[in-house]
Image (cartoon, grey):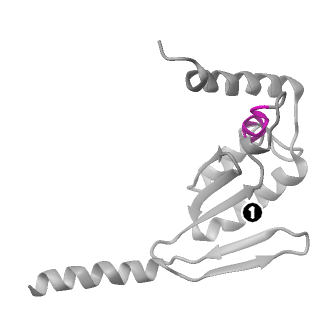
């Protein structure tokens, strides 16, 4: 009985620790910053969410949010295509992105001292994204191909 009680108490103590307070800030430029601390591991997860997704698209631009998600990895004035991912990887991290109906989000997971690397790269993408016409056309085809299985009738 004591063992079961100990296990249950340990489980619930971990749940309490995981429910850290959420702090919300607004930067001078209007960007909302949400911080939820979790000290169970020496890592950070940085996420940038844009309030744009498939539900914001009208006929004629369907899929544009997803295409732009892909373009965010194609380089900036300061970083060539693929360099963002390479820098995150060299710093021991992982990154990815997703587009939903209402949001497009980009995230990185890194060792906690590397958080500035993530912030610097995301800020560069926000300000200096390069939208090459040929790359845009290529990514448009990639997104269209990904949508075909979901929109085609069953065989």
Q: Nearer the viewer, residue 41 or 101?
A: 101
Which quadrant holds residue 26? bottom right
Element at label 1: helix
Q: Nearer the viewer, residue 52 or 140?
A: 52
- Magenta extent: 62-70
Tally the marks: 1
Looking at the magenta stretch, what is its main secondary structure?
A: helix
Disc 1: CA contacts within 10 A as few (<14), some (14-19) or many (>=20): some
Residue 131 screen position, x and y as percent: 88, 35
Residue at image coords 77%, 42%? 72
Residue at image coords 91%, 69%? 29
Residue 60 screen position, x and y as percent: 84, 27
Q: Pick out the residue farthest to the bottom.
A: 2
111 lies above or below 86: below
Which quadrant holds residue 4? bottom left
Q: Name the residue under label 1.
A: 119
Q: Quadrant of the N terminus?
A: bottom left
């Amino acid at each position: 009985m004591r063992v079961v009680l100990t296990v249950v108490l340990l489980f619930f103590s971990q749940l309490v620790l995981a429910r850290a307070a959420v702090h919300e800030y607004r930067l001078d430029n209007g960007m909302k910053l949400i911080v939820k601390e979790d000290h169970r591991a020496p890592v950070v997860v940085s996420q940038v969410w844009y309030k744009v997704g498939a539900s914001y698209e009208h006929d004629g631009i369907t899929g544009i949010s997803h295409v732009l998600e892909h373009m965010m990895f194609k380089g900036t004035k300061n970083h060539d295509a693929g360099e963002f991912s390479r820098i995150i990887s060299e710093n021991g991290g992982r990154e990815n992105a997703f587009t939903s109906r209402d949001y497009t989000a980009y995230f990185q997971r890194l060792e906690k001292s590397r958080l500035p690397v993530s912030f610097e790269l995301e800020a560069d993408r926000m300000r200096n994204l390069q939208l090459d016409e040929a790359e845009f056309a290529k990514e448009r085809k990639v997104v269209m191909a990904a949508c075909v299985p979901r929109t085609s009738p069953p065989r």
